[in-house]
Image (cartoon, rainbow, N blue to C red):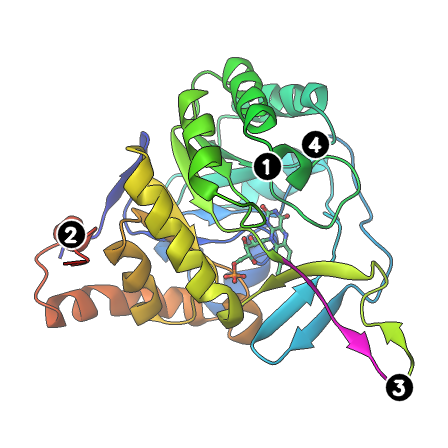
Amino acid sequence: MDISVDLGGLRLKNPIMSASGTFGYGLEFSPYGDLQKLGAIVVKGLSLHPRSGNPTPRITETPCGMLNAIGLQNVGVEKFLAQKLPFLPADETPVVANLYAQGAEEFVELAAILGDAPRVGALEVNISCPNVRCGGVQFGQDPEAAASVTREVRRASPDKPLIIKLSPNVTDIRVIARAVRDAGADVISLINTLGGMAVDIHSRKPRLANIVGGLSGPAVKPVALKMVYEVCSEVDIPVIGLGGICNARDVLEFIMVGAHAVQVGTANFMRPDLIFDLVDELPGLLAELGAESLEDFRGSLETQ
Ligand SMILES: Cc1cc2nc3c(=O)[nH]c(=O)nc-3n(C[C@H](O)[C@H](O)[C@H](O)COP(=O)(O)O)c2cc1C
């Protein structure tokens, strides 16, 4: 069964990718499975300089998922290139660098550095983080700002496939999708976390030091699926669907509404070996559903 995909020039042997921020720098998950099995590894969001993130507590459980306000803690791009990237199986499984910056200039600098790094297969630009004071979702909620960042990153890194990661915290996701497509995105990924909050009635305190955070996991899957469906119906570039994927059936729901590939996020915290099993389970489930290839199954949703 052929389950390979082409994501704007990035060839993947299967559509299963890790979601940024939930898979470390990849190597942390090597005790749980063979990293080379995965379609691609998307690493933790990288900024120009190291970041220590928000104060703790910055993760709390909710009935159907988790709420986080990590605040993009990361080692910074130089340390990533020197100490993490060389140990990833980038030939077999492309490494996707996820970029976070506080302003357009920083995005450009970061994109130029990562665009030149031979072992980085593609760039994924996070214009959708709700947990930081500057940058992040501010870029992703305004079509002009989203287009402008996309254009600048495209110019700074003309050769690498460019993925723009969208926020669900908008009124009409299709407007933002069109804006980044027109500005030069090769691929769109969605969704990032949904704004959320949890409080403790005994201490009368918010459960996160940041007060508010981003909701992920099974609770967000129906929202994600709707938005992925809408974006796939709106733009003609490949889409990566994510949000609450926990098993192979979830993967195929996203593919059925039109996604080329998927990313697995919060489920990695629940079962660190799950992502590897998904790769094994996918061909069998597709065959059971009568599909001859992943391509044959993609977008096969019947709405009439
Ligand atoms: C702890 C945590 C950290 C995250 N860090 C990032 C990040 O650095 N960059 C990014 O683009 N998304 C980040 N995300 C968002 C996820 O990649 C994903 O878009 C979101 O969690 C929805 O997918 P899921 O429900 O499968 O987790 C993070 C999510 C979590 C839970």
154 versus 66 height, above or below: above
Q: Quadrant of the N terminus?
A: bottom left
Q: Which residue is mark 4?
A: 101
Q: Which residue is mark 2?
A: 2
Q: Considering only order in the chain, which callout, 1 or 2, is on the residue closer to the N terminus?
A: 2
Q: Position of residue 221 (x, y in %)?
A: 45, 65
Q: Quadrant of the C terminus?
A: bottom left
Q: Position of residue 51 (x, y in %)?
A: 80, 43
Instruction: Name the one closer to the observer, 260 or 271.
Output: 260
Cα distance between the residues tagged 3 and 4: 37 Å
Q: Considering only order in the chain, which callout, 4 or 3, is on the residue closer to the N terminus?
A: 4
Q: Considering only order in the chain, which callout, 3 or 1, is on the residue closer to the N terminus?
A: 1
Residue positioned 21% across, 51% down in the render: 299
Cα distance between the residues tagged 2 and 4: 37 Å
Point out the frontmost of discs 2 and 4. Answer: 4
| Marker disc for residue 140 | 1
